[in-house]
């Protein structure tokens, strides 16, 4: 909280505004324990990440290194098929055709647990969220457009079709600001995980060198955002599922080891993640 004591003693608006701004600036630069000792200004920068620089920095990597981002590889497969004005004809429900669904899955970038165990078959896009998110992310990005049941590249998509770093940043922009993180689950909160996901990246950057369970990160996340915490176990499970089991795994940021249906997952950051992100010095 900004200290407002003594402001009533100012007899002109100019001096009052100068003092108030001074206190606001001091508040924005003061570290807060619940924010991992970040200042409010740094937390706001994280909320606008990756478009605004702050305590976490995103590095440009080579094409070879970017092949370690599963979702990027899958998105680029679709982009390659639309280069030069080509289109992808979608099904009546707006999904990818089965042949293309199987082609994406055959890349081996992301595996679906139920498909791998033989519990379900890959007959359509909706059978594997690891595939369906590829089309959804691309469709709502600046890279592609859907018209008359067909998906094609925009002018921006054509321009940056071979720029993996640009595509990766756009994927993050869509995940952070456009995509509904609750889309694949039945948890009531739409905010858990999606509120300041870059703070979760920062936590993984700081602590992910050692194997830690998802509750370790959930405690720190809800300490920073206690207003999101509902029932503890449900909220912790929701946060872990969305942040790590899904979206950070889809991006190749974390290795996830499941220990049981009701047990927290064991997490460790990947080498690719460490190469992609740096902490401000």
Image: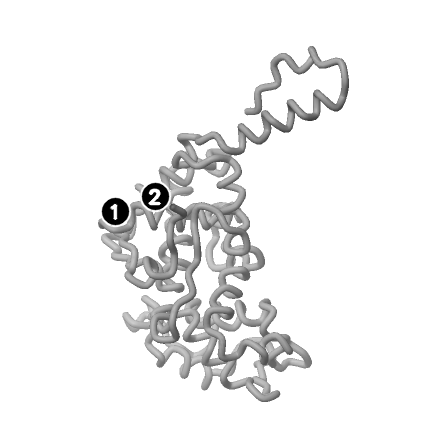
Q: Are marks 2 and 1 in contact (CB under 8 Å)?
A: yes
Q: Quadrant of residue 123?
A: bottom left
Q: Is residue 60 visible?
A: yes
Q: CA distance from mark 2 to mark 1?
A: 8 Å
Q: Is residue 230 left or right of residue 141?
A: left
Q: Position of residue 25 (x, y in %)?
A: 57, 31
Judging by the rendered image, the residue that carries numbered circle 2 is 217
Q: Is residue 188 visible?
A: no
* Circle 1 Cα neighbour tier, 10 Å, few/some/many (<14 / 14–19 / ≥20): some
Q: Is residue 240 above or below residue 23?
A: below
Residue drawn at 63 percent across, 75 percent down: 145
Q: Is residue 132 left or right of residue 7?
A: left
Residue drawn at 41 percent across, 47 percent down: 280
Residue drawn at 44 percent across, 46 percent down: 55
Viewer-proximal residue among 79 and 161:
161
Q: Position of residue 133 (x, y in %)?
A: 48, 68
From the image, which quarter does the N terminus lie in? top right
Residue drawn at 49 percent across, 84 percent down: 80
Q: Position of residue 216 (x, y in %)?
A: 30, 41
Q: Position of residue 38 (x, y in %)?
A: 43, 37
For residue 16, which numbered disc appears in the image?
none
Please report whichever mark, 2 or 1, sits nearer to the chain's N-terminal start. Answer: 1
Q: Is residue 94 left or right of residue 226?
A: right
Q: Quadrant of residue 203?
A: top left
Which structural element holds mark 1?
strand
Viewer-proximal residue among 114 and 256:
256
For residue 212, which numbered disc appears in the image?
1
Q: Is residue 129 left or right of residue 25?
A: left
Which structural element holds mark 2?
helix
**In the rendered view, how is the structure colored?**
one colour
Q: Quadrant of residue 138?
A: bottom right
């Amino acid at each position: 909280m900004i200290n407002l004591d003594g402001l009533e003693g100012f007899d002109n608006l100019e001096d009052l505004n100068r003092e108030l701004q001074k206190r606001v600036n001091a508040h924005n630069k003061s570290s807060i324990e619940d924010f991992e000792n970040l200042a409010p200004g740094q937390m706001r920068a994280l909320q606008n990440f990756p478009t605004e620089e702050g305590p976490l920095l995103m590095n440009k990597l080579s094409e070879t290194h970017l092949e370690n981002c599963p979702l990027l590889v899958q998105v680029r497969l679709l982009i390659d098929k639309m280069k030069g004005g080509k289109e992808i004809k979608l099904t009546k429900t707006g999904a990818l055709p089965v042949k293309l669904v199987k082609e994406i899955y055959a890349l081996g970038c992301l595996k679906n647990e139920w498909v791998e165990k033989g519990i379900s078959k890959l007959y359509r896009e909706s059978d594997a969220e690891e595939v369906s998110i590829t089309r959804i992310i691309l469709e709502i990005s600046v890279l592609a457009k859907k018209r008359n049941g067909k998906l094609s590249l925009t002018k921006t998509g054509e321009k940056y079709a071979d720029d993996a770093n640009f595509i990766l940043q756009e994927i993050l922009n869509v995940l952070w600001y456009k995509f509904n993180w609750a889309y694949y689950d039945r948890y009531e909160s739409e905010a858990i995980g999606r509120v300041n996901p870059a703070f979760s990246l920062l936590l993984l950057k700081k602590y992910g060198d050692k194997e830690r369970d998802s509750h370790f990160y959930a405690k720190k996340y809800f300490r920073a955002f206690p207003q999101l915490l509902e029932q503890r176990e449900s909220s912790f499970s929701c946060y872990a599922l969305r942040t790590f089991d899904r979206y950070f795994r889809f991006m190749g940021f974390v290795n996830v080891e499941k220990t049981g249906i009701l047990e927290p997952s064991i997490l460790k950051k990947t080498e690719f993640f460490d190469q992609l992100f740096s902490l401000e010095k």
